[in-house]
Amino acid sequence: MKKLFIIFVLCFFGTAYPQENFTSEALKITPLVEGTLLLPETSAKPPLAILIAGSGPTDRNGNQSMLKNNSLKYLAEALTNNGIATFRYDKRIVKLIKMNKVDEESVTFDDFITDAVAGIEYFKNNARFGKIYVIGHSQGSLVGMIAAQNRADGFISIAGAGQEIDDVIVDQLAKQAPKLVDNARKSFDDLRVNGVAQNYSPGLASILRPAIQPFLYNWMQYNPQEELAKLNVPVLIVNGDKDLQVQISEAEALQKAKPNATYKVIPKMNHVLKEIDGGYVENSQSYSQAELPVSEELIAVITKFIEAN
């Protein structure tokens, strides 16, 4: 039986590139935001790209405890080899888990925005860098586009949702578990109106359990199309056509909200930025195959966008 690849489900709980033309620094931005800064050796004042991870307890490398794919690590290293400094950081939930201080009900979506803003502000007036770009992956796309407003010089969405998160999940369920759709829609509507959902199906417990509802309710307050439209800087919207979690229609919705954005669908790229030739099994296995490099076309598209803007 196929497991559900719902963008929200994991919300809380390789082949190296041949030559490294960069240096690495460990940085602590706040008590809960720690990451890795990569500096290219070929540029005196390079542009800086800040990478924001997607759903789940995802670390700076794009990994979770049972899913090691090194997607963000490989992307950061490749961009820095191309002359673009990068900073990637662990989500605060990773730090809280390590500190044994996880309280699901106390973590909000706004916390992730706060952390992203802290990262941008930390580097904004740093004389070592030129322009600052924000790259948000999956959930990090919405976080990034909000944090980038009036702060960054450019924004890049990779596999970002184009709808409010409840609508995204309902659409995913329609494809993967259609019998749950009606109950999910009613439960989300209850949550939106009343701040709590009570009569949800046991099949939705991983998404709508009481401890997670405050986080989900907070996340639902943001519409990606409205937030993206607020940006007055160059925008790149990217999605892979092998993405099991975020459909191309989500990227199309973002493009509609920002018609002047650069838009690219990358053939064979999946949600963890790997190139997939086969079907579902190969695609799902790649989530824990750290030896697979990220899409070369993705690297080229982002590099070209940053160099041109």
Image (cartoon, rainbow, N blue to C red):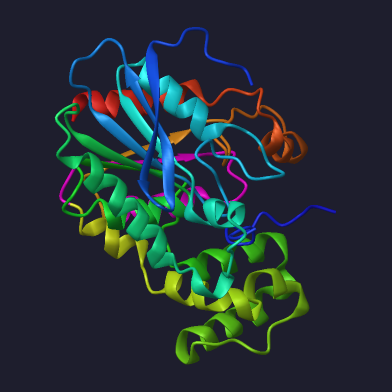
For this rendering, which residue is in front, 249 or 104?
104
Q: Residue furthest top?
A: 19
Q: Which residues are magenta?
A: 232-256
Q: Quadrant of residue 261?
A: top left
- Which quadrant of the rendered structure holds the C terminus? top left
The magenta stretch spans residue 234: yes
| Residue under the point 25% across and 52% down | 258
The magenta stretch spans residue 35: no
The location of residue 196, given as percent across then percent down, is 55, 87
Q: Quadrant of residue 87?
A: top left
- Which quadrant of the rendered structure holds the N terminus? bottom right
The reply, left or right, for residue 26 in relation to residue 152 is: right
Q: Quadrant of residue 105?
A: bottom right
Query: Compared with residue 104, is residue 225 higher up or lower down, i.e. above or below?
Result: above
For this rendering, which residue is in front, 285 or 30?
30
| Residue under the point 20% across and 53% down | 231
Residue 246 seen anywhere in this rendered image of the structure: no
The location of residue 224, given as percent across then percent down, is 36, 61
The reply, left or right, for residue 79 in relation to residue 290 is: left
For this rendering, which residue is in front, 233 or 59?
59
Query: Compared with residue 148, is residue 282 higher up or lower down, i.e. above or below?
Result: above
For this rendering, which residue is in front, 274 or 219?
219
Residue 173 seen anywhere in this rendered image of the structure: yes
The location of residue 125, given as percent across then percent down, is 14, 39
The location of residue 190, given as percent across then percent down, is 54, 88
